[in-house]
Every structure is written in C-alpha cells, then in structure tokens.
Amino acid sequence: MQHVLPGGERRPWHIVQATITYVVMALALWCVFVYVPTEKVQGIVQRIFYFHVSSALTMFLAFFVVFVASSAYLWKQTSWWDSVAVSAAEIGVVFCTIVLMTGPIWGRPIWGVWWTWDPTLTLTLVLWLIYIAYLMLRAQTPDAKRTRFAAVLGIIGFVDVPLIRWSVVQWRTLHPKPVVVQEGGTTGLPPSMLLTFVIALVACVLLYFFLLRERVALAQSRHALEALRDDIEQRLES
C-alpha cells in the first residue's frame, strides 16, 4: 500500500492566495487607521468596530463550516470531512476569542464596564465554551466513537449561532442593534465606513480560508501518517 502525504508541495495558486490575503489585510489596516474618518460620538475607539464585527461574521462562517463538515462526516465517514470540521472549529475559536476580546475593549469607554451579562455577550461566551469543549474532546486519543460524538457536538453547537443573531436583532439589550444592514435593507454607515467595513470583512474571510486550507492539509498529513504507521505495524506483525 502506498501512502502520499498531502500538502507537501506549494502550487502557484497557493502563493497567489497568500499574496492576495496579505495585500487585502494591509489595505484593511490602512483603511481602518488612516482612510476612514473618526466617528463623532464614540471617537477613536469606534475603529474597533471594523475588527469586531468582521471577526464575528467570520466566526459564524467558521462554525457553519463545522456544522456542514460534521454532518457530511456522519454521512460519509471520510477523514477529509473530519479534518475540515476540526480545522474550521479551531479557527472559529480563534475568531470567537477575538470577538470576546475586542468587545469589552470597545464597550468599556461606551458602557462604562468591561463586561455585562447581556444576552448577546453571554450567548457568545457559551458558543466559545461549546467549541472549546469540542476541541478538548478532539484532543483525546482519536477513535471512531469519539469522533462521531464530536461531530454531533459540532452540529448541536451551531444552534447557538442563530440565537446570537436573533438576540442582536430582537432583544432590547445593551449590545447595539445592527448598523451595517438595518431593517428595510438600509445601512447606518456612511460610504467611507461601509467601504472600510467591507474590506475588513473580505480580509478576515480570506485569512480564514487561507488558514483553513493550511490546517486541513496538516490534518490530512496526520491521517496519512497514522495510516502509514498502522500499515507498517501490520507488515511487521505478519
């Protein structure tokens, strides 16, 4: 049996993806700190908005990928879908951590407190804890039963995502209402702020897919190494 470790070569399109990600991220930083004007009411702290909301939307995307990949794994039982699920979960937790860190930094000058048990904040913290538990479960010695249980947890955990969105839109909480897309499809941002937000969001999404590709390649290499080790052990025993 011949085993090929995936991700061992760098194709031109991989370099192009990394370059595009770098350029867009640099452009986003320039727009946030140089191009966009300072908000009159909140002041310079409002610039955190572009990182906070972009990270939150990317976090939702990451956990949606966990939901889809976990469902596909339970259906197909293939290692590739499992690799996608755990990779997306790891990156989603990173972006969720950014959301939980930038939120209090932004909220402290505006609300006067670092943290409040606002429903939106609490649900986001619960989401972080769910996928931390998912990663802790996956950190144990892998076996088919534990992997299936983790996939179920990855699917159930996604239920918290629409709850967070619903709490922002429907509940009267301390957390501000949506400003990018308001009721009726309008936006509460002037053109320069909307453009900066879109660029920051594209930068976060590009970074997410770049990291996802790298992490999946690493996970697939690990699966191939484990298969190669099992094959060698079987040959030695025989």
Image (spheres, grey):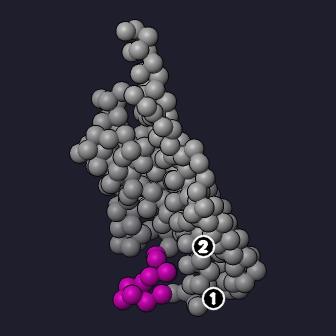
Secondary-structure class at tag 2? helix
Q: Where residue 80 sits: x, y (%)? A: 39, 44
Q: Would residue 92 be found to the left or right of residue 148 on screen?
A: right
73 shown above or below 108: above
Q: State the residue position of label 2.
A: 200
Between residues 19 and 170, which one lies in front from this camera angle?
A: 19
Q: Which circle marks residue 192 in the picture?
A: 1
Q: Amino acid at mark 1?
A: Ser
Q: Residue at x 32, y 30 (%)?
A: 144
Mark 1 and mark 2: Cα distance apart in space: 12 Å
Can residue 31 be seen? yes
Q: Residue at x 38, y 73 (%)?
A: 169
Q: Quadrant of the N terminus?
A: top left
Q: How many marks?
A: 2
179 shown above or below 10: below
Please report the bounds of the magenta region as a residue range.
177-187
Mark 1 and mark 2 in contact? Answer it, CB < 8 Å. Answer: no
Q: Main secondary structure of the magenta part?
A: loop
Q: Quadrant of residue 197?
A: bottom right
Q: Would residue 190 be found to the left or right of residue 82 on screen?
A: right
Q: Quadrant of residue 193?
A: bottom right
Secondary-structure class at tag 1? helix
Q: Amino acid at mark 2?
A: Ala
Q: Would residue 101 be found to the left or right of residue 5 on screen?
A: right
Q: Which circle marks residue 4 in the picture?
A: none
Between residues 114 and 143, which one lies in front from this camera angle?
A: 143
Residue 222: in magenta span:
no
Which callout, 1 or 2, points at the residue further toward the start of the chain? 1
Q: Residue at x 45, y 57 (%)?
A: 62
